[in-house]
Image: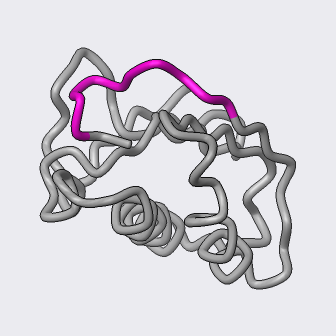
Amino acid sequence: MAERITYDFLPKIAGPYVHAVKYNGVLYISGITALGTPAQDKDMGSQCNEILRQLNQIITAENRSKKDLIKLTIFVKEIEKLTTIREQLFTFYEGNLPACSLVEISNLILPELR
């Protein structure tokens, strides 16, 4: 049976979903943004740092490690600024590179999100 999880330490959810669902030992994490954090109005690097901080909190709360990250999908509005976050990602992964897709999109839920 699936376990639906809402984390008190993450920003309040603004839609009809949960932060994560655990099923058959696999943790599926909903999309994370800087919404509702001090980084919300800041640049892509600041928002990426906040998102990785939140992801790390989830990993820690679930007694997992970055080695358990299998697949990430990253959505950005300004792909030309990819170098801004690339080094942050390498540092965060600590050598445990996951499969990853990077997609440029026209917008996120709020215009200030990058």
| Rendered view: 92 above or below 72 | below
User: Between 32 and 18, which is closer to the camera in this rendering?
Assistant: 32
33 displayed left or right of 66: left
Q: Residue at x 13, y 49 (%)?
A: 36
77 displayed left or right of 10: right
Q: Which residues are magenta?
A: 103-112
Q: Is residue 10 magenta?
A: no
Count of all numbered marks drawn on residues in the image: 0
Q: Is residue 110 magenta?
A: yes
43 displayed left or right of 70: left
| Rendered view: 91 above or below 113 | below
User: Between 22 and 84, which is closer to the camera in this rendering?
Assistant: 84
Residue 66, position in %: x, y? Answer: 69, 72
* Dominant secondary structure (helix, strand or loop) of the stretch shown in magenta: loop
Q: Residue at x 45, y 61 (%)?
A: 48
Residue 18, position in %: x, y? Answer: 33, 31
Figure quadrant of residue 42: bottom left
Image quadrant containing the N terminus: top right
User: Between 28 and 98, which is closer to the camera in this rendering?
Assistant: 98
View extreme (front): residue: 80
Q: Residue at x 40, y 33 (%)?
A: 4
14 displayed left or right of 102: left
Figure quadrant of residue 12: top left
Residue 96, position in %: x, y? Answer: 84, 74
Specify the color scheme. one colour
Residue 59, position in %: x, y? Answer: 53, 67
Image quadrant containing the C terminus: top left
Q: Residue at x 71, y 38 (%)?
A: 102
